[in-house]
Amino acid sequence: MIKTAIFDLDGTLFLGKTVVPGAAEALERLRLAGIRVFFLTNAGTRSREGVAHKLDNMGLQAVKEEVYCGSYLVAKYIAQNHPGKKAFVVGEHGMAEELKAAGVKMAEDADIVAVCLDRQLTYEKLAKAHKLLKKGAHFIASNKDHTFPTEHGSMPGAGSIVAALEFSSKKAAHVVGKPNPFAFEVMERELGLNGDETVMVGDRLDIDIAFAKNAGIKSALVLTGISKKDEIKDKKIAPDFVFPSVAELTLP
């Protein structure tokens, strides 16, 4: 029996600034049924508080403690695995907020290059990150998402920035977001989740459904974002459930 539902955001609950019809009602229905609801996004441009505020403004009720985002996961990973190390950020304000909250200091001459989507990316910033990586800095990324969906079509994701730095530095990034199960390990520890009673709801086979498989939890694909039903060919990442949208979501 499912007792916890983890929702992806972009392409699952909304597209850009447009909420998927019936999404708010679906979340309310689950909560009234006693199912715990959490949100997991690879996006790292906002802090947990910033994501919760955005969801609230869209009519999708959320509090900070229910949100797990790329910026938080990067900060969590660095604090746990590289205590005392300084980070150079290729990212936006949300990443800096979470690093500061986790006690990770930021510097130009750093031991770690932390990367997420950066919509103000400059060549100068890319060059600084490249030089640090060539000098031996650790390479930590929120995700390698090629794109993210919007109401106007897909846009380049954080993976496009990660790929540029991997190509120039010849160094592979360690990705902490989906499909890496690190996020579920953090949630399991902080929230006391039971994998057998948890489902991941998302729109991407290669990210959300693969994450669920790697974490050993159930998965539900919704068809409002990137992946389509006819793309389900690889049995290794086939979802347990498929729904046209979250509005039609029903859980056992």
Image (cartoon, helix red, strand yellow):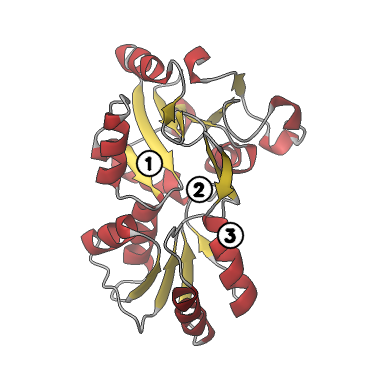
Q: Would you say 195 lies left or right of 55 here?
A: right
Residue 114 occupies quadrant: bottom left
Q: CA distance from mark 1 to mark 3?
A: 30 Å
Disc 2 designates what residue? Answer: 181
Amino acid on which the number 1 mark rests in the picture: Glu
Amino acid on which the number 3 mark rests in the picture: Ser
Say what secondary structure mark 1 lies in. helix
Residue at 60% across, 21% down: 241
Q: Nearer the viewer, residue 85 or 130?
A: 130
Q: Would you say 108 lies left or right of 123 here?
A: left
Say what secondary structure mark 3 lies in. helix
Disc 3 designates what residue? Answer: 160
Percent from the top left, x then y, of residue 73?
38, 54
User: Disc 1 or 2, which lies upstream in sequence?
Assistant: 2
Disc 1 designates what residue? Answer: 188
Residue at 32% across, 33% down: 55
